Structures are given as C-alpha cells and as structure tokens.
Image (cartoon, coloured by chain):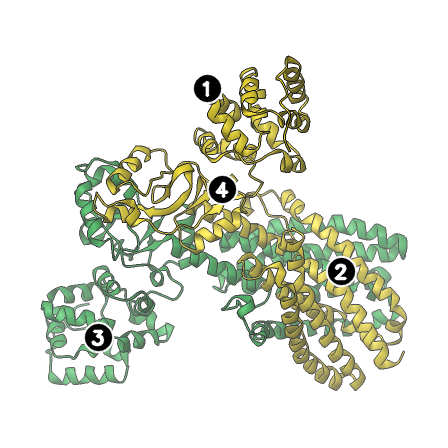
Chain colours: A green, B yellow
Amino acid sequence: MVWSRVPLSPDLIDTIRDQVNRKDLAAATHELSPLDIADLVALFERFEQKPRAVLYRLLEKQRALDLFEELPPALQGELLHGLQDSEVTQLFADLDPDDRIWLLDEVPAVLATRLMRDLPPEDRELTASMLGYPQASVGRRMTPEYVTTRAEFSVAQTLVRVRDRIDQAETVYTIPVIADGRRVIGVVSLRDLIGAAEDTPIAHLMEDVVTATVMHPAESAARLCTERGFLALPIVDSEDRLVGMLTIDDAVKIIEESETEDAARQGGVEPLRRPYLATPVTALVRSRIVWLLVLAVGATLTVHVLEVFEETLAQVTVLALFVPLLIGTGGNTGNQAATTVTRALALDDVRPRDILRVLGRELRAGALLGLLLGALGFAVAGLIYSPAIGIIIGATLLAICTTAAAVGGIMPLAARAIRVDPAVFSNPFITTFVDATGLILYFLIARSVLQL
Amino acid sequence: MVWSRVPLSPDLIDTIRDQVNRKDLAAATHELSPLDIADLVALFERFEQKPRAVLYRLLEKQRALDLFEELPPALQGELLHGLQDSEVTQLFADLDPDDRIWLLDEVPAVLATRLMRDLPPEDRELTASMLGYPQASVGRRMTPEYVTTRAEFSVAQTLVRVRDRIDQAETVYTIPVIADGRRVIGVVSLRDLIGAAEDTPIAHLMEDVVTATVMHPAESAARLCTERGFLALPIVDSEDRLVGMLTIDDAVKIIEESETEDAARQGGVEPLRRPYLATPVTALVRSRIVWLLVLAVGATLTVHVLEVFEETLAQVTVLALFVPLLIGTGGNTGNQAATTVTRALALDDVRPRDILRVLGRELRAGALLGLLLGALGFAVAGLIYSPAIGIIIGATLLAICTTAAAVGGIMPLAARAIRVDPAVFSNPFITTFVDATGLILYFLIARSVLQL
C-alpha cells in the first residue's frame, strides 16, 4: 500500500495534540501512520517534551529508529528525557493490556538500553512497562548495567572497558560480544580474559551464547540461567539486539518468588507478602478465606449428590461409613497426580501439548493404584461386612483412583494451556472436584450391585 | 588424666593390625589413645598404606595434625594416597552413623583440602563422607578447587595466583583472604581486583566474610549463598579454617532438589528420579502406592468413627449429607495452614521454638475462618433444612476450622523438631487426620443439639 503524501498542516498538529491530551492513542496512531520520516521530524519539532514522548511510543520500531536518527541531537536528548518522565511512563503503565498489544511495538534496542541505564533500579520496572515489555517478562527484571565487547577487540581493550564501567555495571563476569546494531554474537567470561594474554583477540576466546528475548517469561529465563549455571544471561529484543542482562542473583530471586507462589497455590492459599510471623492474623485469614469459600461452595455439590442418593443411603446405612474413606482416597490420588505434573510443568519437563500422553500415563497409573487398593478394599470390606459390600468398595476404589489420577494429571496442563497458573487448580480444588464425582461413582456402583 | 608411657611392643602392632582387619575400629581407637606422637610416628612407619590410612582417621583432629607434621615427607604423601584409596573411603562410608559420631573427628583442614583437591568431582562425595562430613551437609557439596589470597599480598600478586589456578579452580570470582592456619579473615571479589591499582594491598579491598561450616545442612548454606547474592560461600571447619567453597550454581542445584522433594512430599508422593515423561508408569505407581496405602489405612479410622455413630446416622440420615462438605473444609483449612508454615520453615522464617506462637496464631486464624464459614453454614443450612441443622453445621464448621488450622500449623514444626522432613506430614496426611477428628466433633455436636 502506498500512502499519498499528506501535507503537514497546523490543523493536523492541533488534531494530534488534542488526541494525545484526551489519551486517545488509537486515533493518534492512526494520524501518524501516513506521515513519512521528514514529516515526523517536522511534527516532533513542534511538540512539547511530554506529548512528544507519548507520540514517539506510538511508532513502529523501524520508524521509531529512523526518526530518532534523523532528529537533531538536542531533540534526541530531550526525547530520552521525555520517555523517562514519570507521567509518560505512568500513562503507558496504566494502559489496558488489550490496548498495549496493538499500540506498542518494542522500543529500538539502542534507545531501550540508554533509557534504562539512566534510571535508578527502582524506576526500571515502570520504564520497562513503557518500553512494551509485558508483566512477568524478563524485560521487567533485567539489568541495563553491563559491559560489552566486540570480536575484533583485544583482551587488553576489553579490560579497559570493564574497568571504565566497573562502578556502574551490575555484572562484569559475563561479557556479551556484540556486532553492529548491538547484535549479540557470543559471550566471553572475565575469567577467560584474566587467563589469556593481553593481545589475544576476543574472537579467540568468544563462546557460543544463549540468550532470551525481553518478552520471555521471567521464570523460564531464570531457570535457563540457573540450569545452565550462567552467571548472567544476555537479554535481546526480537531482532537479537542486546537490551539487558539477567544476573544469576536476580534469577534466583525470580525462581524463589515463583516457588513460594506455587507452594502457596498448591495448598489453596494466596502467597504471603511478608514473613509468616510478621504477618497479622487477619492477613493470614484474608490469604485463605477466598479459596476456602470457593471450595466450600464447590463442596455443596457433594451435598446435592448425596441428596439424590438419600434413599439408597437410608436403605443401606452401612454405605455411609465408607464415604470419607472413598473420597479421601480419591482426593489423595488426584493430589499425587496433580503435584507430580505441576512440578514437571514448573521444571519444563512437560508441556501442554503432551496432554494426551499425560492422560494415558495417569489413566494407567490410576488404574494400577486402583487395582491394588481395590483388591485390598474388596478383601477387607468383604470379610468384615458382606461380599456385596466388598465388591462395591473394591470396584469404587478402582473407578475413583482411575478418574482421580486422570483429572489430577491433566488439570495443571489444561490450566497452563488457557494461560492460568497451573498451581491455581490446587490440590484442594482437585479434591473437591474428585469428591463429587467419586460419590456419584460410588452410589451408581452400589445401586447396580445391590440392584436397588 | 596422665597416661603412663606404654612401650611400643611388636605385640601392640599385631593387636592393632588385627583390630583393623576385623574392622573393630572402636578397639583400635582405644589402643591408640595412650600413645604419644613419637609412638604414633613409630607405629605408622610400621604399617602398610591402607591400614595406616584407616588408623589415621581414628585420631582426634589435633593429634592427627601433630602426627602429620612429624611424619617424613614421603610418608605424608603415602598417607594422603591411602586416605583417597577407594577401599578406605568405602570402609568409612559404610560405617553405621552411630559409630561415626564418636569415631571420627574432622580431618585437619590442610589435609582435607589437599585430599579433596586431587580427586575427580565424582569421587569427592565419598571422600567427604570419609572426612567425617555428615550426609546432606555442605561438606559433601563444596568444591575444593578455589583460589585464596592473603591480606598482605598486593592485587598484582593475587592476580598471579588467580592465573596460576585458573584452569583448575571452579570459582575465581570470590577469593577468600586467609591468615595463618588457613583461617578465613575476609573475602575479595575478582571485580574489585580488576578495578583496583596493581599495587593495592588486599587488606584495603578485603570485605567482611560470611562463612558456613562443613557440618551445616547443605540446604541452609545454599539459601545463605543465594539470599545474600554471593557467587561463592567459603566453607570452614569448626576452627574457621577454610576447607572449600560452595558455588552459586551448586547452591541453586541444592535448593532445586530440595524444592522438588518438598513439592512431592506435600502432595504425598516420593520425588521422581527422572523427568516425568521419562519415568515408567510402574515407577509412578511405586512413588505413590506407599503413601496411598498408609493414608487409606489411616482413613479406616473414619469408618470406625462413623460406626460408633451409626445409630445417630440411622436416626437422622440428613446428617450424612454434610459429611464430605464438613471434612473437606477441615482438610482444606488444615492444608492451608500446613502449606504456609512448611514454606515459612523452608525459608527459615519460622523455627521449631516458635511452636507456641504459631499455635496461637493458627488457633486465632482458624477460629476467624470458622466463624465466617460457620455463620454462612448456619444461615444456609438453617434456611434449607431446619434451625437445629443450621446450628449443628455452623458450630461444627467453627470447631473443625479451629482444630484443623491448629493441627496443620504445628504439624510441620513438630516434624522439624523431631528431625523429620516437615513436608512428610504432607497435606494428605493432615487431611486424613483432620477427617477423623472432624467427624467426632460433628457427631458430638449433633447429638448434643438434637439431644440424642
């Protein structure tokens, strides 16, 4: 599609200024799209610092880079300041996630690094959100304070660069090797620099590099970093241009946070924000009451199921004796499967596309467990009560264990597939679900065996 | 106590040789104790390499060090080889833990480091066990390959040392500063070395050091390392003498292993040794069946409880309808408390001595949760069934939530106090326990309200 040249009228400038003031970013984006770089330069020269920064964030990445390079140096500096302005960053942080997706392209890597670098660490997350890096992405957690080198530099030249930035850099032990356009082509460790002769070219010491993109979930980038034993992982944009580093101590913190969250969710509580003994009792209650209520409401299902079978229950009261044992065993089997699969997901051992394999495995594991427990239940209940009761208990254990393992196993995968934290389908949740189905199975089996 | 000088007779040599052959280490220790260093040197000169190494490990630390220094250099080398001999290390690895406690003092730090350093990483754990470092202690996981410096050295001298050992050392980024006798007095980072002038004395760059002892549990040393963001943590013996370093990548692995174990135990499964999809279904079953059986046997308690109240149940069948809901809510409340406290324990936020504070907090939290749920239960059950049923359900929810939270909260602390993994008192375990008590509470309340 070719755009006809639209002259840059004072009207257009007013229109766009008005749109920015009304925060109608979609309309402003639309107005900007037909303009060429020369028009954009003219337009940007006529705007004040804050609206200029806002407009800049509405451009696609390549146009943003082209424009930046065409701007007079003074305006480049002003633009950078504008992009760091707290009102501007807040405006983008407050955007609806849906708006952000089509509004914001990444900021060009060279600007992103310069923007982040001038900021105190506590302001970085807000700016990272303005840069278009999604929540819980590694872009929000990386550090912009690092040292780079180039393949054609010598060890001595690189050490000079290291010494120059040693006070600012958060990490100097892993040094990315970049080519033109900040593309990362390798990595060199400070250790190897120290061990090598001063005139060795970096190209000789450079090792293959593993990177993660800014959009990558922080947790999986962190696991990549710790599993491979990297002291720092270079973070790149979608064009492999370096924008930051994830250091191992931050990676450890990210993993720790997610482990705490997973552990809590598995037990059906919200993670505490503070150490246990420093958390007021009312905050403990708040972290538990919502799930407890949800689960209690879910459990009213079991009341309804039992009501349906109340007549059977009145006829054969002995059936009531086994209710807690049967649903308890189902809950345990479901929890075991869910725990194993949730952990496997957290460690990336299993992915949502493996759902059928997991289902097959859990059905078999559940059936095997059910056969073992069912045989035992049949023998014991058959001897103590009656053969009919023995058959009912045995068959129910087999049925319950099989369904519970299958449900418990696929639930975390289903959650991940719909982008919900797998640990949210916590063990208590699975227990409640399995309770109700277990009761239905139990009474259907009892009725058919007893021919009621 | 003063020992009379016992002459070193050929008989004594034969006796001791015989004791070592019979692996009666207690008796050999007894024979060694009255000998002075000169006697020991004479004795050691008369032994072969393997029994000599075994005898050496029976000496207390100070005597072991004194003897080592008195031995001719050739014998020193032979002794080190003997201590690394696989038969010797295996002998000590196979010792009963009870025997080890009084038999084995630590090996002097200077020997420990030299012993470990000459070994391939895969043999280190066995030697560490021979050195007297207990299972799951950081002594088993530290690396002996590091670089040290001294306060009086210059930056240039230290960098020479770093370059000399750069191929062997597993970590060169954190360099312990030692004084005489290998005592750790500080630490200096490679980063600071690079940033400083070549003639700066280490004393000027040295920072305060945090260490862990070899006997420390590996997990808490690992958490110390990651929480403080250390790239390596110096590990010392009981006299603060350096014997190894725990690197952050090993620390991360240790924590990961223990998280996986905790997550599994919480769900009542044994941790898998392999990735989920690579684990045969029969191995999945094996990891679950024992706990499932234990819990099922525990759950027969609920059958007995219900039998006791069978008459009440037959009179008022409507009571049966609420059994799953009530015990489910109890289980959930117990799980929530157990999950929170287990995590707090893992993060060292809570210690066993806090048991009364935890009990008080969980009683209050449980009572509050019980009041909220109980009020709701009273209203709903009262409206749908009868006021009496409403009162029973409301009061039972209050009673169950309070006890469940208290039991769930103190169980992990009790486990830790008796040195059992807190996660072993897993959520399923607590559920089963709470089920039985919940039923008793329910029927006692029902009987007294209905005056049966």
Q: Quadrant of the N terminus of chain B?
A: top right
Callout 1 crowding tier (Cα within 10 Å): few <14, some 14–19, many ≥20: few
What chain does mark 3 sit on? A
Q: Nearer the viewer, mark 2 or mark 1?
A: 1
Label drawn at residue A326: 2
Task: Give the residue type that dot 2 points to.
Answer: Leu
Q: Nearer the viewer, mark 1 or mark 3?
A: 1
User: Which residue shows up at 87% across the image and 69% down it?
Assistant: B309
Mark 4 — residue?
B239
Task: Give the residue type that dot 3 points to.
Answer: Leu
Measure the alpha-carbon separation of dots 4 and 3. 65 Å
Nearer-the-camera pick, A128 or B112: B112
Mark with earlier residue (1, 4): 1
Nearer-the-camera pick, B77 or A436: B77
Callout 3 crowding tier (Cα within 10 Å): few <14, some 14–19, many ≥20: many
Mark 1 — residue?
B72
Secondary-structure class at tag 4: loop
Measure the alpha-carbon separation of dots 1 and 3. 82 Å
Examine the rendering and report whether any part of residue A188 can be seen. no
Measure the alpha-carbon separation of dots 1 and 4. 26 Å
